[in-house]
Structures are given as structure tokens and as C-alpha cells.
Amino acid sequence: MKKIVSFLIVLLGVLFINTKLVFASLTFRDSSVKIGVDYVLDLTVNGGSGNLSWASSNESVVTVSNGTIRGVSTGSAYISVTDGTYSAMCSVNVIDNYVAVSGISLPQSSMSLSIGEQKRINATVNPSSASNNTITYVSDNNNVATVDSSGNVKGVGAGSAHISLTAENKVVIVTIAVVDNVPLKGITAPADLSLTEGEKSKIVVNFNPTNASNKGVSFKSSNTAVATVDSSGTVNAVSAGEATITIISTEGSYVATTKVKVAALDKSLKGISLDKTTVSLKPEETVTLTVKFNPDNAENKKVKWSSSDKKIATVEEGVVTALKPGIVEIKVTSDEGNFSDTCKVTISSLPIESIAFEKSLYEVYVGATLALTTIATPENSFIEDAIWESDNPQVATVSDGVVTGVGEGTAVITVSNAAGDITASTTVNVKRKNEPLLITITGYDLNFSPEVINYTLLIGNETSLDIRTNRDAKYVVIGGNRDLKNGSIITVTVNEGNKVTYVINIKKKGSSAIYFIAIISVLMLINIIRILVKNKKR
């Protein structure tokens, strides 16, 4: 007979696997453990001798000692306990990836409810991946509040109780306060509320009695264009005018009103500012600048945008577009008050990979300048501190990409970076501009024409003249331009592939008068001699 009873005890334990067992006066809950982890079984003793004997149905899976089990290998086994008179049993699952409970999360540690009212304790086990996420709920005073296995608490009688939540060996407590339902007899609210446009204020509702159980109310505005009100009683002043806020209680439909007067706000603009003072961009990138107005509800929010250099960056409706490397100032100016603010935009170059000249051959005239055009990869990148060089400075010089023609011929212009790994070259052909030949003499009007070969020039007492042409000196030979006197001949020979010699006949001013004076002097001298001879004969 004793064997039959023991068999029935074991059988009942198996049937109640994964549940809280109560057999005779010994109970404990099922558990899952990880290999190598000790776990204390939750055993409740109601009476009995107190001399407990523990056993495992498969010690290769789980062992037990004085109620502490340890997983040995994955699998299932039964743990039994007896005091010789009463027995109980549960199953234990041993898993290799067992995740223990680290705690229990509660949205609140206390709860109030009325007699007969029911509320749920929304608890969660941490971590969410815990192998055993079962929570048990126990009330320490069922005369005040009861709780079911899902955490639903019901108020039974006025007073306080504590609900214990247990997950594995983690326990938290929720304090429950149960009150008798106190009926509401009426509500009041401030009669008047004065606000300025844009302000907010909360209406404080007074309940009679102050400990009424149901303090639910609703709020409604008679004119939402003037003032709005939310569910908490917070009034928002929208525009100048008057509105009435009506408060109605959930219990008894008691009514209270508050008259709201909204005064107009000075909406003239006091100033503006930008949300950014400095910005760094790369070519083709954009950024949006936002204007902040003071006050926020200023009526006139018209502004104008400008860029200090549209070749570097442009701006439209606050959207700045970077074009090429450089620094630019973006300015916004208000229509009202002419307030302004600026943002410094720095546009940095993209890392250059290569560079080439737009042309392999350029032409420039002697004395003229020409800006060379380069093409960089990627687009809008450039060489910082570029080095420019000419292999023939006597023909052409270069500075920051600008070539100056010096003399006829060709020169190779090279641009490179400091390291010399980014470089490009082009050829510049310098030639003389094909202008009509011009010969000038400083201080005199020769009235020169390339088609006229012979000229006569009346000069003063100069012994040489300052003769100039618009041709390179190496193509011009000037002869006879020294010790000039009346009748001297100056030749100007120009040889630019077609040799031409121009002749200038020199006449000196005052030569005829001197000749005339000389003749008179001779005649006077002859006449004097004649007079002297005649007088001697007498």
C-alpha cells in the first residue's frame, strides 16, 4: 500500500510539471537552470517534521543538495523532496544557453484604487531574453487587495496592502492603497484670467470635497481663435480678444467657467539672427541658413539675402550653394528695421588628382597679358600655393597664371604643386602685333607715312635727334644722327623681312640770315677799303 501511495505522489508531480505544485504540506516551483549554475529552489513548508530529504531522478543532468540544484548537462530531470510523511516533486530543465533574470521593471511602485476598482500591474522581466520570464504575484493582505496570476489587482476593502512580484530570485514590491469612493459635490475655477498673445497659463480646478475620488474634468474654449485649452487645463493665448473656458466634471457634470482676456502683443520686429555664424563647405555642397526673429511672432518677416562674392557662393531663400574655393560672407537683412546678420562661409578645395591646361598652345602679343586656363580633376579642385614657371623669361613671364609677352618667340609655361607630383605644361607663342610702321622725332612733327620715303625736317641747333619707332630695336638701324648741321641726312632702315630705308633731310633754322649777314659784312668791308684808298690819293 505504501508503494502505491508513493507512486501516486510521483505521478502527480509529473502531471504538474512547469506549474506551482502543492501536495500535502510541501510545495516548490519548477525551474530552468544553466549548466554549472547553482539555483535555490523556492520551497514552501506548511507543517511537517522539517527533516527534508532531496533526490534527483538523473544526477547526470542535475544534482540537488539541501534545495540547491546545479545543472550538469542539458536535459530534464525530476527533483523530489520528502520529510518522510509528505512529498513534492518538480521538473528541472537544464539548458546550455540559460539567461538568468537580472531584475523586474515597474512603471510605478505604488497604486491607488477604490473599492471594487481593478488595475493591472504592468511589470516586465529583465532582460527580455531571460530563459524564465514567469512572474508570480502575491498579496500580503487579501482583505484590502487581491491579485491574480496576470497581475490584475482588485480593491476589496479600504486600507493598504503590498503585492510581491517574484521572478526567479528577484523580488519587487508594489504598495496598494484602497480607498472608499468619495462622491464629488461640485467644482470651482478662477473667474478671470488675463494673458498676452503667446502666453500660457494653467487653470486650477478646485474640487468639493478636496478628497473626492473622481476628479476627472474636461475643458472647452468658446473661441479657439482667441484662446485654446488642452486636456490638462493649460490655456494658450492665440490672439487679442475674449474667450470663455468651460470646465465640466466627469462625475455629476458640474460646471465652472473662466473668462480669458487676451491682450495684443507688440509684433514689431526687434532684431534678427542666423542659426549659424560660420559654415565650411566644399564646391557644389549646400547649406540652409535659418533666420531667427525677435519676437518669434513678429508680423513682418520679410528678408533679403546677399553674397559678398557670387563667384564663390550664391544664396537664395537662405540656401547657400558653394561654387568654388574661397571665403564669402552671406548676409540677411530684414525688410522692417533694416536689421542684419552674417554668416562666414569657407569653401575648401577638393583634393586635386590631376591638372591640365585648356589649350596646348596660346598666343600673346609683345607687351600684352593673357590669363591661362587650367582644368583640374576633380572639378573645382585646385593646387594650393601653385608654382608657375617660364622656361624663357625673355619671351614670356608668368605670375599666378597670367602670362606677359616680353619678346617674340616661344616659351613653355609650367604649373605644379610644391611636391611636384601634380604638374602641367603649355606653350606660349609671343608675336608682335602687326601695326603700321611709325617713326617719330621727339619735339618735331615728321608727319610720317610708311609709303613716303623722303622727308625734310627743319630743326633748331640740336646736334642729334630722339628718333623712335614702334618696332623692336633689333629690326631698326638709324644712321647719320650726330653732328647735325644744315644739309645733314639721317637714314632710318627697317628690316622685317622687307628692307626699307627712310631719308630725312635736315635744314637748320637761321642759316639764310647768317649767310645774308655775311654778305653784307663783306660788302661793307669792301666799301670801307674803297673809301680809305680814295682818301689816301688826296
Image: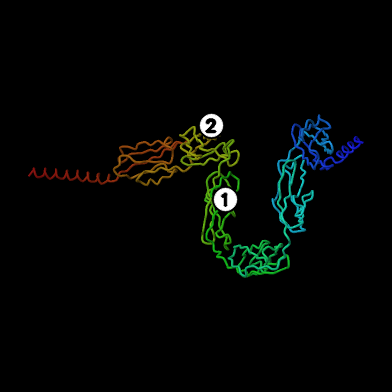
Percent of width and height locating residue 452: 42, 43
Pick the residue in front: 319 or 265.
Answer: 265
Percent of width and height locating residue 38: 74, 34
Q: Is residue 212 left or right of residue 381?
A: right
Q: How many marks do you count on the picture?
A: 2
Percent of width and height locating residue 425: 55, 34
Relative to 229, is 309 above or below? above
Pick the residue in front: 46 or 223.
Answer: 46
**Could you tell me how far apart the alpha carbons at marks 1 and 2 are, in whole angstroms?**
34 Å
- Which residue, given by chain and number where applicable, does mark 1 sit on? 314
Q: Which element is circle 1 on?
A: strand
Residue 352 picture quarter? top right
Pick the residue in front: 351 or 178.
Answer: 178
Q: Which element is circle 2 on?
A: loop
The label on residue 101 is none
Mark 2 nearby-residue class (10 Å; few <14, some 14–19, many ≥20): few
User: What kind of colouring is applied to the model shown?
Assistant: rainbow
Q: Nearer the viewer, mark 1 or mark 2?
A: 1
Give the quarter of the figure containing the C terminus: top left
The label on residue 420 is 2
Mark 1 nearby-residue class (10 Å; few <14, some 14–19, many ≥20): many
Q: Farthest residue in the front direction?
A: 49
Percent of width and height locating residue 195: 59, 66
Task: Give the amino acid type for the residue marked by disc 1 in the picture.
Answer: Thr
Q: Is residue 443 left or right of residue 315?
A: left
Q: Is residue 443 left or right of residue 60?
A: left
Q: Is residue 24 left or right of residue 478?
A: right
Q: Farthest residue in the top direction?
A: 60
Say which label, 1 or 2, has the lower sequence index. Answer: 1
Task: Give the amino acid type for the residue marked by disc 2 in the picture.
Answer: Gly
Residue 439 picture quarter? top left
